[in-house]
Image (tube, rainbow, N blue to C red):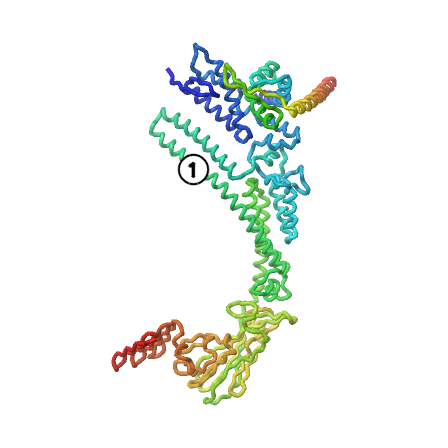
Amino acid sequence: MKQTINTENTQSQMRKGVLELCTLSVLAIGEAYPTEIIEQLKSSKMMIVEGTLYPLLTRLKNANYLTYRWEESTSGPPRKYYKLTPEGEALLKELENTWDEMVDAVNKLLKENKNK
Amino acid sequence: MNKTLTINLAGLVFNIEENAYQLLKDYLAAIKNQFKNEEGCDEIVADIESRLAELLKAKTHAGKQVLVDADIHETINVMGKPSDFEENTSDEKQSGSASSNQKTYYTNKTRRVFRDGDNKVLGGVCSGIASYFDTDPLWIRLILVVLFFGFGTGLLLYIILWVIIPEAKTTAEKLEMRGDPIDINTISQTIKEEAEQLKNRVQNFGNGVKNEFTSQRSQSVGNKIGNLLYTVFHGIFKVISKVFGALFVLFGTLLFVALLLVLFNVGTVDGLSVNEFLHAFTGSDFPMFWFKTGLVMCVGIPLCMLVYKGLKLVFGIKTSYMWLNLSAGILWFVGLTLCLYLSLTVASDFSEETLLKTQIDTHFTNTDTLFIKGSNNYEKNITDLDFEMDNDRWLINNTTQPSIWWGKPRVKIIASENDSVSVFMIKTAAGKQKTEASLRAKNINYTAALRDSVLLLNNFFSFVNTDKYRNQGVDVLIKLPKNKVVYLDNSLKYQWYDIENVNGIGDAEMSGKYWKMTENGLTCLSCTKEELMNNKDSVDVHEHIININDSNAHVHIDKHGIEVNSKEAHVKISSDGIKVEEKKK
């Protein structure tokens, strides 16, 4: 029982770790409001629970990586459309590099150990 | 059938069942609590509310207008539990970027003091404190360096801080090190939040109980008040404990500096440096170093502990070190024992006292008036005497080697049992044994001589410091036969000691006057009426005579009657009758 919880926890930790990168990547295409971001993340199975996204967006916004504008909605409450700032774009590039390096390194490591 | 409520969530109106409403409300409160220490908390909550509204909107349609438990549960499952939102992600981000805005980016907890191992020079104490107070470490280091030159207090303080402040090792601790500063605002914020949570909890409790027994509601109200009081007092206590902590640190440090100053020979006791004062009592064979060590341990350790506890209160450090308390206690006890033991060895020198009584040759005819004068054997004025002890004035002359103690003798006049004048000189001293004491008494220099009708007494007695102060003293006892007239010279004004007289005049005021030894005791011959009257509040009872004096009146009662003499009137009651004379000014 305890073992499964730990596995789940590790998996969710991994996802959470790259959530920032994924969110920035979604926004790199263009403006989006949280529900759109969530949908894209869900479709690529990056999302565990939706609540995780909101604090992340607020923090990125407060750190000047994102800006937003309000837009009225016909079907619900007004929406916040988020957009990358130049700093956000720089951060995305940096994180992408880190991600590539990490994926390479991890894959290499896993392969090496499997072949042993 | 269920009761429904109407709510406004992010600008949309919902009809919701009561139980579902409670669920939603608790969920939102939990989210708020999760982000309460985060910048932009309200914004996050508003965003989440807005998303909840969107999700819930999708659950209603023309055929189903009311939200029920199941809807809320499903929505919560989509959004996730508040505990899933946060925590672990921040760690990775924190260590990932070292940008300057990380401070505002991820502050989430109340600030605590840690040693900052990343910016350390020695132990990271200064940089840790600096980040606690939002200043540059340079200033804190500067203060400590300045304090270091103040008798090493800086070093001591640094070591204490090094020991008691834990190092920020985990990322969480590093975050706490830079967390929200603790000030009145954040404290009142915490109190407000706690009170709100409490209110909700109590309300829930109240609702649950309402269905069972209405009588128990009062209990929940009582609990509510009790809990609220607890929260408020807890907040106040926090503030007060910090104030007290600061005071502890301040006084502890000041007193410790004072202790060191005193022991390093800077302070004085009645004009005598502390070392001289101690040496005067102890002599050269005394292990002064050990005594001082004991003193530092005995007094210094409690002061250090005071500073320690104060710092703990100020910075809200809860970790306590058993070994620290224990070793401090042991060292204190050792210091105390050392001090007590050494003090007792000195005190034992006072255990035996001796008197050395010598009579001075006097040949007197009854008709002569006896003049008692001082032969000033010390060049200084009596008011220059250095320090007071045991109501005697003492002076140590340090210009000579070894230094010399000067003390004031006590001169007393009493009635003689026979017809002749006799003068006694009594030297006293203490020691471990009788022989030691009498040797000390013998070593006291004091002379009294009679020339014609003048008795010349030394103003001071003296002994050298190699003898140490062991209760040395000199008494001069002058016995006068009846009808003998004596003149008390002004030069011995401060040496007269407790001389009884009929007129109830104080010792110092007896100087410069002629006195006659009568049946009742010494009687003033040259006193003015004012002087007799000005003696405050004295009652003299002799055989058949009562004299009552105060500043306003003089009452004399004898076998002839009662006489009252005051500034306003003179009243006499006698066998002649009652006579009242009013005085006019």
Q: Where is residue B329 shown, x and y percent of the image?
A: 57, 49
Image-based side of B87 in relation to B543, left or right: right
Residue B491: x percent and y percent?
A: 52, 78
Residue B437 sits in quarter: bottom right
**Secondary structure state at the residue bearing disc 1:** helix
Disc 1 designates what residue? B229
Who is closer to the viewer here, B157 or B57?
B57
- Return the chain for callout 1: B
The residue shown at (52%, 70%) is B392
Residue located at (40% from left, 72% from top): B536
| Amino acid type, callout 1 | Leu
The N terminus of chain B sits in image quarter: top left
Q: Residue at x 55, y 30 (%)?
A: B38
> B289 above or below B313?
below
| Rendering quarter of residue B115 | top right
Q: Horizontally, is B43 left or right of B284 in the view?
A: left
Of all residues, the one furthest to the top in this rendering is: B63
Residue in the foreground of this view, choosing between B402 and B130 = B130
Label 1 environment density (alpha carbons within 10 Å; few <14, some 14–19, many ≥20): few
Tell me where residue B146 appears, x and y as whole percent.
65, 50
| Above or below, B221 relative to A1 | below
Q: Quadrant of the C terminus of chain B?
A: bottom left
Query: Is residue B163 in view?
Result: yes
Which is nearer the eye, B463 or B276? B276
A113 in relation to B332, above or below: above
The structure residue drawn at horizontal position 58% and vertical position 32%, both measured from the top left corner, is B107
Q: Residue B46, image x and y in percent?
A: 51, 24
- The answer to whether residue B522 shows anywhere in this view is no
